[in-house]
Image (spheres, coloured by chain):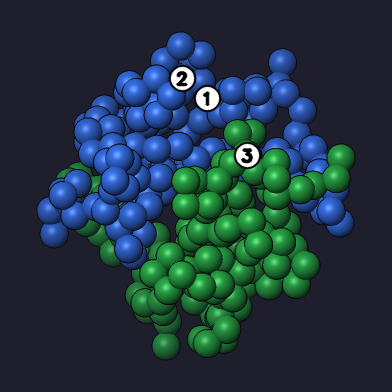
Chain colours: A blue, B green
Amino acid sequence: MAFSTDSLTFTADGLIPAIAQDAASGEILMMAWMNAESVERTLETGRVTYWSRSRQAFWVKGESSGHVQELVDLRVDCDRDCLLVLVRQTGPACHTNRRSCFYTAIRDGQEVELMEPEV
Amino acid sequence: MAFSTDSLTFTADGLIPAIAQDAASGEILMMAWMNAESVERTLETGRVTYWSRSRQAFWVKGESSGHVQELVDLRVDCDRDCLLVLVRQTGPACHTNRRSCFYTAIRDGQEVELMEPEV
């Protein structure tokens, strides 16, 4: 069946959450948002392209930092209201220079930092 | 540092997205939503507990199906507006009886089904 972004369910703001996973290691890198056109741009260019809610602009991941995400596979969930992008990540994914944004664990009521910023 | 759900950023509806990942295989199983109390219940009970937006009720994953998610680790992202739960998943995570909700890939403009329902 041909894919169309018309089949996706977007929020009232026209957005859909996209989870980025390292295609090689399986590590979850980050979660950000896409609109219909950023899904299309991601599929067309192979460069993962989010929608920045703060800047209200397309956000080609790594465009300024060089920490690009090359698309390996794009997946849609059963409800069609969430995307999973498997990527080849160059450098750290997080703006804190950590590999993943999910570097804080909650264990026995305490916050535990799992990763250092890369240098 | 002691963890408090007060440090999380919730949507206007009081919700935060939670990504469930199989702790052993690294597979992404599903994405659902939590409110502050479901985060607390998940940490206290070790049973992953979402907030069902359709039913407007707590949703102890697997309570009716038996396909429970036992919490292995809970992580918060840098912006504190997304959670990652690493789980031990009993049975399929998806309501379609597939292991993961992300069973549809988009390849060359076509939808490709990656998983069959388990029996």
For residue A3, the mark is none
Kind of residue indicated by mark 1: Thr
Residue behind mark 3: B80
What x and y, as percent, mark residue B34?
Answer: 56, 59
Kind of residue indicated by mark 2: Gly
Residue behind mark 2: A62
Q: Mark 2 belongs to which subunit?
A: A
Q: Residues within 10 Å of mark 2 (few under 14, many from 20)?
A: many
Q: Is residue A46 left or right of residue A85?
A: left
Circles 1 and 2, Cβ within 8 Å, touching? The answer is: yes
Residue behind mark 1: A90
Question: Which residue appears farthest toward the top when viewing the image?
Answer: A64
Q: Is residue B116 left or right of residue A87?
A: left
Q: Nearer the viewer, residue A77 or A66?
A: A77
Q: Quadrant of residue A24?
A: top right
Query: Helix, strand or loop at disc 2?
Result: loop
Q: CA distance from mark 3 to mark 2?
A: 21 Å
Please give the name of the residue rendered at 33% of the width and 65% of the height, measured from the top-left corner: A78
Circles 3 and 1, Cβ within 8 Å, touching? The answer is: no
What x and y, as percent, mark residue B82?
Answer: 57, 45
Q: Nearer the viewer, residue A102 or A22?
A: A102
Task: Please tell me if label 3 and label 1 are on a single chain.
Answer: no
Query: Helix, strand or loop at disc 1?
Result: loop
Q: Quadrant of residue B18?
A: bottom right
Which is more foreground, mark 3 or mark 2?
3
Quadrant that contains the C terminus of chain A: top right
